[in-house]
Image (tube, rainbow, N blue to C red):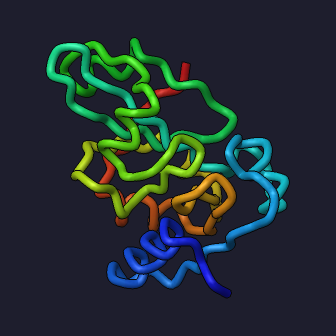
Amino acid sequence: MILSSAALRVQTALQEQGFSAQIRELPESTRTAAQAARAAGCEVRQIVKSLVFRGKTSGRPVLVETSGANRVSEFKLAPLVGEPVELADPAFVREQTGFSIGGVPPLAHRHPILTLVDADLLSYSTIWAAAGTPNAIFELTPSDLLRMTRGVVASVKA
């Protein structure tokens, strides 16, 4: 299968880091957690939402990998990152990650990003993440997610 350039960048990063996950680029959208769950044939809670926040003081990006069923609490994030945060706008997300909202993967970002992983994701045997475009996904395990992101497990749900 021929992948788009963004999905190919993610597939290459997966292989370079020693992961065997295979990206599935689909004709239907996987932009939302509900759409991704339908495409993957799993529950919404097994979808990894990659949300980029921005430090209100420093402007530093923070990536939160959260369960598709959860909302992230900015109040809980602030002490974890050392400053108040806000959800980043689409231009900031693309600038920091190299990907558009709805397709941000857990790896292959343009710049290194502090990553927090929702503790709720650790309770599933398999999860699904975006793979560079709003219609590309891949299956992985929570331990794979932690290894590929070097993320810190945190309770971030609202």
Residue sitting nearer the eye, 101 or 138:
101
Q: Give the answer, above or below, for where 52 lies relative to 149.
A: above
- Residue located at (57% from left, 68% from top): 140
Q: What is the count of numbered marks?
A: 0
Q: Is residue 153 left or right of residue 125?
A: left
Residue sitting nearer the eye, 145 or 102:
102
Q: Is residue 60 left or right of residue 65?
A: left
Q: Give the answer, above or below, for where 115 lies relative to 158.
A: below
Where, quadrant-wise, is the N terminus in this rendering? bottom right
Based on the displayed image, in which of its 4 quarters is residue 62 positioned? top left
Q: Is residue 106 left or right of residue 41?
A: left
Based on the displayed image, in which of its 4 quarters is residue 77 positioned? top left
Please identify the residue farthest to the left as the structure is shown.
58
Residue sitting nearer the eye, 42 or 88:
88
Q: Could you tell me residue 122's position as x and y percent?
A: 53, 51
Where, quadrant-wise, is the C terminus in this rendering? top right
- Residue located at (55% from left, 66% from top): 141
- Residue 74 at least partly seen: yes
Q: Give the answer, above or below, for where 14 lies relative to 119.
A: below
Based on the displayed image, in which of its 4 quarters is residue 108 positioned? bottom left
- Residue 120 at least partly seen: no
Q: Is residue 27 left or right of residue 113?
A: right
- Residue located at (49% from left, 65% from top): 6
Q: Could you tell me residue 117's position as x and y percent?
A: 42, 44
Q: Could you tell me residue 94's position as x and y percent?
A: 39, 43
- Residue located at (66% from left, 50% from top): 47
